[in-house]
Image: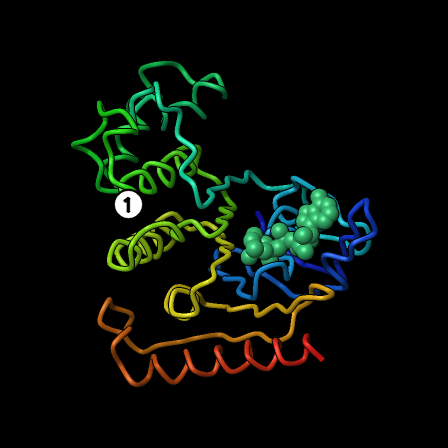
Amino acid sequence: MLQRIEISQVGRVYDDGFVALAGASFDIRAGSMTVLVGPSGCGKTTLLRLIGGLDHPTSGRVIFHGAAGALQQPRTAFAFQEARLLPWRTVLDNVALPLELAGVAPAERIERATAMLTRVGLGGATRKLPGQLSGGMRMRASIARALVTAPQLLLLDEPFGAVDEISRHALDDLLRSLWAELAMTVVMVTHSIVEATYVAEQVVVMAPAPGRIVAQFTPSFAHHSPLLRATPEFAAVNAEVLRSLGEAMVGAQR
Ligand SMILES: Nc1ncnc2c1ncn2[C@@H]1O[C@H](COP(=O)(O)OP(=O)(O)OP(=O)(O)O)[C@@H](O)[C@H]1O
Ligand SMILES: [Mg+2]
């Protein structure tokens, strides 16, 4: 059983010599919700790929700790800003695809994909093609596809960046409820400070040149409901995150 992910002095220098990430260190508790924020180019996607095992650090390590020592990469799923659905497959067949690739029998994959689509609010759209969905619906399908294999680790790179603000709030609420229900570890990248403050248990603030971690926050609210976003309590935490991001930018420009 995964207990925590240790990001230990992780650095990534790309082949052209560019230092995208320098000595990043922090812990991610298993079952937690961590959000990475920071200006464009500060290494968020780079770090997410390293956590997901899509790339390897050039220094330091990403360590998956279990009770009895280090573990292999846990079952990991990704979702990105674009839904990346196959346009010629129905929504159901798109969501069932990871199960098909894993060799799950047809009846079971249809059952599991249908259940996940229902869970994300797309139970009525299973036979539609991606081109017949709204942007928000496409993202729901993309999340369903990521979750259908029951990942232990879900990595999201600006997943809701391309949808309108109202849909985005609904998707943030959906993400939080899925996270609570499915007991998975989530790491999400976003450009939205409001989204980070609302969704995260742990906000990790990054700065560029070289990419690094400059602050960490653990937003904790007495009542987590959609109206939280309109409270002074929320605004205060949000301002704190915004301030640290501003300070990081000023530091980077010096
Ligand atoms: N394969 C690569 N080779 C060289 N440099 C790269 C490569 N991939 C990314 N970079 C550089 O590393 C830095 C960090 O990139 P990364 O994609 O991690 O940033 P980001 O924080 O995700 O930015 P954004 O918010 O715009 O998505 C950028 O300056 C980018 O140009
Ligand atoms: Mg990125």
Which residue extends farthest left?
A: 124
Q: Residue at x 67, y 66 (%)?
A: 208
- The answer to whether 226 is drawn above or below residue 47 in the figure is below
Q: Which residue is under mark 1?
A: 136
User: Residue lying farthest front?
Assistant: 253
Using residue 223 as the reference point, say whether residue 199 is left or right of it: right
Q: Quadrant of the image for the C terminus?
A: bottom right
Q: Amino acid at mark 1?
A: Gly
> For the point 27% across and 74% down, which residue is it?
228
Q: Residue at x 30, y 29 (%)?
A: 130
Residue 3 is at least partly visible in this image: no
Front position in the image: 147 or 48: 48
Total number of numbered labels? 1
Above or below — where is 53 with respect to 9?
Answer: above
Residue 128 occupies quadrant: top left
Residue 111 visible within the image: yes
Q: How is the image coloured?
A: rainbow
Identify the residue shown where x is 53% and y is 65%. 37
Residue 51 at x, y percent in the picture: 63, 49
Residue 157 drawn at (x, y percent): 50, 50
- Mark 1 close to ligand 2, CB under 8 Å: no
Determine whether the residue tagged by mark 1 lies in a helix, strand or loop. helix
Expressed as whole percent of the image width and height from the top left, the position of residue 236 reads 38, 85
User: Nearest the camera: 217 or 223?
Assistant: 217
**Number of residues whose C-alpha sits closer than 10 Å to that of mark 1, classed few (under 14), some (14–19) or many (20 or more):** some
